[in-house]
Image (cartoon, grey):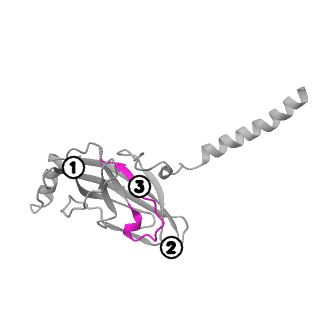
Amino acid sequence: MEIGVTMNSRIAAPALALLLLITAVSPNPAKAQDNSPSNPAAIGSPVRSMIELGSNYDIVVTLLETVRGREAMERLKAASEKNVPPKAGFEYVLAHVKFEMKGRTVADNRAFDLGSLHQWFACSAELAEYEGISVTVPKPEMTGRVLSGQSVDGWIAFAVEQKESKPLMAFDPDAGGASGRGKTLFFKLY
């Protein structure tokens, strides 16, 4: 009986050590697996995912800051006097977002275009998509080409219902030039 216990201990101890080593040296797990409309990322939480541009590229999207209501309108007016108030029952939300992209191999050198009107959108907690708006946002705008190894940050504007207490922002990479292999990511605009 004692031999069996010793033999199991000899196998279990190295297996446990190997499991701990793998856990300790593995990179951060992708949070995109847990990211969904019912589990959107909080402000400041980076969300890791991937997009396909001929080959796979790793991306990290972080909602850095949000501004809503009167302050958002003031910032929009400062950006351009041509910005008008939203329609009745709505208010503006500004989102400051950081987008990072990195190819998985040295040969991955494609660019990804940010800034499509349909690439970033707001929706209600019940996932009713809000109509896109066209306003001049504060500098820097969330537009431009991102190459492997680069990052871009900028502002995006949305109009949401004033009564909506938990609006969401979504990023749909398929609307911005990816080849149909990117997951839509969700973020809290509150």
Residue 143 is situated, as x and y percent measured from the top left of the image, at: 30, 65
Circle 3 sits in a helix, a strand or a loop, which is it? Answer: strand
- Work out whether 33 lies above or below 108: above
Residue 30, given in percent of the width and then of the height, sits at 51, 51
Residue 146 visible in image: no
Judging by the rendered image, the residue that carries numbered circle 3 is 185
Question: Of 186 and 80, which appears nearest the observer?
Answer: 186
Helix, strand or loop status at disc 2: loop
- Residue 105 vs residue 39: left or right? right
Residue behind mark 1? 161
Residue 130 at x, y percent in the picture: 26, 57
Residue 114 belongs to magenta span: no
Residue type at mark 3 is Leu
Please state if 25 lies on the left or on the right of 179 as rendered.
right
- Name the residue at 35% across, 56% down: 170
Tell which tag, 3 or 1, sits nearer the viewer.
Answer: 1
As for residue 182 lying within the magenta part, the answer is yes
Q: Position of residue 120 (x, y in %)?
A: 32, 60
Of the two numbered discs 2 and 1 on the same chain, state the one appearing first in sequence: 2
Spatial distance from mark 3 to mark 1, Cα to Cα?
Answer: 21 Å
Amino acid bearing label 1: Glu
Q: Specify few, some or many for label 3: CA neighbours under 10 Å numbering under 14, 14-19, or 20 or more.
A: many
Per the rendered image, the range of residues in magenta is: 172-189
| In this view, 89 is above or below 175 | above
Q: Nearer the viewer, mark 2 or mark 3?
A: 3
Residue 54: which numbered mark, if any?
Answer: 2
Q: Are marks 2 and 3 in contact (CB under 8 Å)?
A: no
Which residue is at a point 16% across and 56% down the rendered structure image? 76
Q: Nearer the viewer, residue 175 or 3?
A: 175
Q: Residue at x 54, y 49 (%)?
A: 29
Q: Residues within 10 Å of mark 1 (few under 14, many from 20)?
A: some
